[in-house]
Amino acid sequence: MAAQRLVSHQYQSRQHQALITHVNTKQVQVVNRFVQGDFCNLIFSKQTQADFQKLFVLLNKRQRNERQIASYYDGHYYANLVTQKRLNQTDKHLLQEKNQTVYQQQKNRLDTIQIWFDQTQDANKFLTKTRKTFQADPRQLNLAQVSQANAYYKLIKNRRWQHYWQPQLQKILTYFKNAQANKDKSQLAQENAELEELKNAPLTQAYRPAHVTIIDNVQAVDVADKILQDAGITANKVLYFSQNDKTLSLLRRSGGHYHTQGALIRVTANQVMSGSYRIRALISNPSETAGVITDPQQSNFGRYYEDATGMNAEINTISDYNLSQPIFWLKNNPTLQNSILFSNSQTLGFIYSGNSVLNNGICVAESDLIQLTNVVDSGTLLYIS
């Protein structure tokens, strides 16, 4: 009877084969040795032996998943053994876990590896393309391409690939720096003058380079300027989101009016209220203890902490930042590992990339998110019309 009670206490739902979150592994193993040694069923019935066997099968599957996921980590990088095939196999194995708390914990850790793997693959593709251009004719590279190559390198989350690309990228950066320094002064002055003209000139037609989405923005900026004027906005720099056009644009105030700085970025999904917000943090691969204060009653509402354990809040596994109070832990939502946090006095949200549609969120392409992190900073005004 004691053995049966021990088995029963390890289940959250025996009907659904769901073990409790923290199985008493040591005690189960000790009793199981006695059960397995009772070959003639003198002490334990066949049913008890069968029940222990089922329990061990479920426990072993859980531990196998944990070992597999742990093997994918190399500190804050993913291990060399990681492949898409292995990630897919582990993802299928996780479906055998019926305890939702354990499943979500393991799923979050696996999703983090998936994101690291995907962004590293994207970086490899872009850097390979940049290297080919550099090898063919270094003079073909411009400042935008070199800057983006450097940004993609920072996304790499595998030590081997990081070591592989570091000297090659350094070679490109050194060449470009020297080439810029060696340019004829008159030529450089002429180029700077042309660049200033381009900065203040509106696009006359749509243009779509491979790494960013751009649409004709002459009329859009005029509308944005009027809306910001009517709203009494006077900030020097505004990240403007038009929900009607589903576009983001960085605007600068000059001569009493707002002018575009760069291209419009297309928003692929959004669920956010109109109004004024502030960019609070540019988040990139946060620590395991990173968090955001989500309680509007707190004076530091919307603030991001790289280590939020000092806030005296329990760590949970809630992936929806709208539901997790008083702190949302970044590790619970892999989609937000690279994102931009914004908030006002009552609402917080994120600009992110991926396929998810998040409440109080703005979704853009990954390359556009990288571009945004290079042009906005903490304190930038975000206005949503």
Image (cartoon, rainbow, N blue to C red):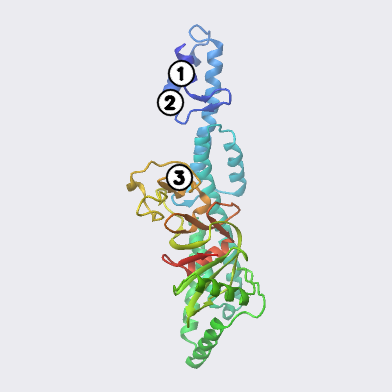
Q: Earlier in the sequence, mark 1 or mark 3?
A: 1
Residue 198, above or below 44: below
- Give whichever of 180, 358 is nearer the camera: 358
Amino acid bearing label 1: Leu
Q: Is residue 298 left or right of residue 249?
A: left
Of the 4 image quadrants, the one containing the C terminus is bottom right
Residue at horizontal 50 percent and vertical 38 percent from the top: 67
Of the two numbered discs 3 and 2 on the same chain, state the one appearing first in sequence. Answer: 2
- Which residue bears the numbered disc 1? 6
Number of marks present in the image shown:
3
Closest to the camera, between mark 3 and mark 2, is 3
Q: Verify CB contact (< 8 Å) between mark 3 and mark 2.
A: no
Which residue is more in the foreground, 302 or 374?
302
Q: Helix or strand or loop: what does disc 3 sit on?
A: loop
Q: CA distance from mark 1 to mark 2?
A: 9 Å
Whether residues under marks 1 and 3 lie with C-beta atoms below 8 angstroms apart, the answer is no
Q: Position of residue 367 (x, y in %)?
A: 57, 64
User: Mark 1 or mark 2, which has the lower sequence index?
Assistant: 1
The residue located at (52%, 19%) in the rendering is 52
Residue that badge 2 annotates: 24
Farthest-out residue, front: 230
| Separation (CA) of disc 3 from disc 2 | 29 Å
In the figure, 89 relative to 186: above or below?
above
Asked if labels 2 and 1 touch by Cβ distance under 8 angstroms, the answer is: yes
Which residue is disc 3 drawn over? 324
Q: Is residue 54 visible?
A: yes
Measured as percent of width and height from the top left, residue 350 is found at: 50, 57
